[in-house]
Amino acid sequence: MLNNQTAALEELTRYRRDLHRIPELDCDLSQTIAYVKGVLEGLSCAIFEPCEGAVCAYFDLGRPHTVAVRSDMDALPVTEATGLPFASEHAGCMHACGHDGHMAMALAAATWVDRVLSGAEGAFDASAFPRNILFVFQPAEETTGGAKYVCESGVFERTATERIFGFHLWPDLPEGVVASRPGALLARSSETTLTFHGVSSHIAKWREGRDALGAAARFVVGSKWLSNRLAQDEPMTLRFGRLDAGTVRNAVAAEARVEGSLRVFSDAMFDRAREEVRALASTAAEEEGVSFDLTFSEGYPPVVNDGALYAEVAGALADMETVPEPLLIAEDFAFYQRCIPGVFMLLGTGTGIPLHADTFTFDERVLVRGLETYQRLLVLN
């Protein structure tokens, strides 16, 4: 759908590299927002901030309903080690998750919409768009879930938004491949923290103590069995990566703290897993005569693609590939899908460089495929 792929690549590359140089964190995005607004202010759209750290561009075409495109803007507290000529100019901060690419695709899509409306795209005119178009640039995807703040602002109700689309760059897919799946795509992630409280004693008098470390060990071993059992009914995982206990080798530990993550794809499994984790902790504590505190963070909901909308998208994107099973990472795009039907897609970079790595980068040519995808979805009836 691009009249000039070379010009599109040049535009996408400029946006991506400019933004890559100025990474910012959480909701503190002054330079990033200024750049985004600088691009949007020359277009025939209304620009406004629905909540702290967010920017929206609204093309009101007089249609009864609106389609939205979402991009996240925040970066990570990572010191860049790519050696790129356009590397981060902000010490200790880096776009190591592809949000610079996400913004570049959304900005290029907005400028394309504007060209269509002005008559500069010969193959299209305003009648090609069956809906108004809303571009959402949000903060805090990596931290507190900026998507939730955008939803709570009421912007989708005010603009009668009925569908939303978004992308994430994905190193494990071949370069330029677009992939997704109907239903559950990404997981709900809940930070799980368990502290056992016992009584310390010298190991020579271990019967006088209450072994918090012993309870933690029982729990961790049992949690693997529990995770495997629950996963037989529905994809999920429960794993613990940190255990701190005791003060010296020859004393029963008075306290043990276990930290891990629970990841599920439905609210029902989230509730069930939490109940069973609590029961397992209670059994381990009882066996060692200790008490415990257990907490679960709410995290982001699972990313679940709307079935009917996904079918429309799949019909429009004949070469979109299907992700064979849900993936165990989390993304706050899920909050949008709790408000309105949405489809989230993955765009392959083909590098294999992990997200959040200090060497993360990609070839901007993949962004052309993302832009073409947005174009097809914006004219979808």
Image (tube, rainbow, N blue to C red):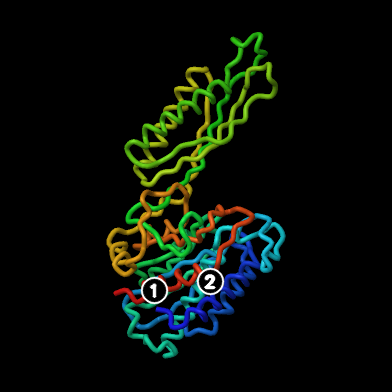
Residue under pointer 2? 104
Query: Circle 1: is it few (<14), some (14-19), or many (20+) Cα within 10 Å?
Result: some
- Give residue 251's mark: none
- Which quadrant of the structure image shows residue 134? bottom left
- Is 226 in front, or is 84? 84
Q: Does residue 189 appear anywhere in the picture?
A: yes
Q: Residue at x 67, y 17 (%)?
A: 251
- Residue 208 in percent (x, y) is at 61, 11
- Residue 176 in percent (x, y) is at 46, 65
What's the CA distance linking mark 2 and mark 1? 23 Å
Dot 2 and dot 1 residues touching (CB under 8 Å):
no
Q: Residue at x 64, y 9 (%)?
A: 205
- Residue 183 in percent (x, y) is at 33, 54
Residue kind at label 2, given as amino acid type: Ala
Q: Residue at x 43, y 69 (%)?
A: 69
Residue under pointer 1? 159
Label 2 sits on a secondary structure element that is: helix
Query: Circle 2: is it few (<14), some (14-19), or many (20+) Cα within 10 Å?
Result: many
